[in-house]
Image (cartoon, rainbow, N blue to C red):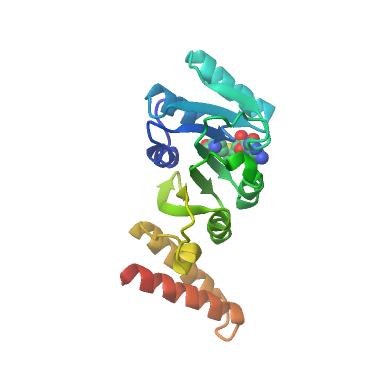
Amino acid sequence: MNRLSKRLEVLASFINKDDSLVDVGCDHGYLSIYLYRNKLCKKVICSDINKNALEVAINNIKNDNLDIETYLSDGIKDVPMEGINTLVISGMGTSTIVDILRDRNRLKGVSKIVLQTNNNYEELRKYMNSIGYYLEIEHATYDKGKWYLSMLYSKSDKKNEENVLKYGFLDNPAYVKYLLCKYEDILGKIPKDNEDYIRYKEDYDKIKLLFYK
Ligand SMILES: C[S@@+](CC[C@H](N)C(=O)[O-])C[C@H]1O[C@@H](n2cnc3c(N)ncnc32)[C@H](O)[C@@H]1O
């Protein structure tokens, strides 16, 4: 591994030196290896549900002679959570992430959750608020021809505003431009009296208003 991809770099930037974390669904283990090598966190554990994926991580860790524990586990079910205060779950759909976070007992010591999903952003933001995690930062990154949203949550009773739950932080002008183009494309294909048109147009106008306010 020469360097991290842009999207993994953003996730790494959310991690602090005093974080003890589980990289859930680590696959190759690149993020964990980067964090460990650069001493960017206190402790890192790699886990994956897939034996072959975890084998790749184990080999990468062995090659570099690193002290990173690995666990074959569905989510965090078989991962020892003592002392863990941070989870990173990236490269999965919202329903898988929600399933992984369902066992609230195992989240007791977890004060920070870093997420990168590839669908149903609004559903994920709402779910995170409902289990007591507040969206602090959401960053849109363009990497290898795709947009990725990286989310940093902290344990809190605070709730995000409705607009944030629905549209996120809209922090990157290029991402907003992409979103608006996508809506324009959809709107161009739907008859104006269709109820979907009205719904999409409302979202389109709202995003414009929020961004250009
Ligand atoms: C697309 S890869 C993403 C790898 C890495 N997190 C990243 O962002 O580059 C998704 C990984 O999540 C793992 N995975 C899927 N469902 C999981 C679950 N319920 N528990 C743990 N790992 C899971 C898959 O086996 C796969 O290795």
* Residue at 48% over, 16% down: 66
- The residue sitting at the left extreme is 213
Task: State whether residue 51 appears in this view.
Answer: yes
Q: Is residue 130 positioned above or below 66 on the image?
A: below
> Ligand 1 lies in which image quarter?
top right
Q: Residue furthest bottom?
A: 193
> Where residue 185 sits in the image (x, y, percent)?
49, 69
Residue 160 locus on image (x, y percent): 46, 62
Foreground residue among 188 and 207? 207
How far from the left and from the top, in percent, is residue 172? Answer: 35, 56
Residue 72 against residue 203 in the figure, above or below: above
Quadrant in which residue 59 is drawn: top right
One can see residue 28 in this view: no
Front residue (pair 104, 191): 104
The image shows a total of numbered marks equal to 0
- Residue at 56%, 55% in the rendered image: 124
What residue sits 54% from the left and 81% below the top?
198
Q: Nearer the viewer, residue 77 or 106?
A: 106
Q: Residue at x 53, y 70 (%)?
A: 186
In this rendering, would 93 be left or right of 175? right
Q: Quadrant of the N terminus?
A: top left
Quadrant including the C terminus:
bottom left
Is residue 116 shown above or below 175? above
Position in image of residue 115 (x %, y %): 51, 46
Q: Is residue 122 above or below residue 32?
A: below
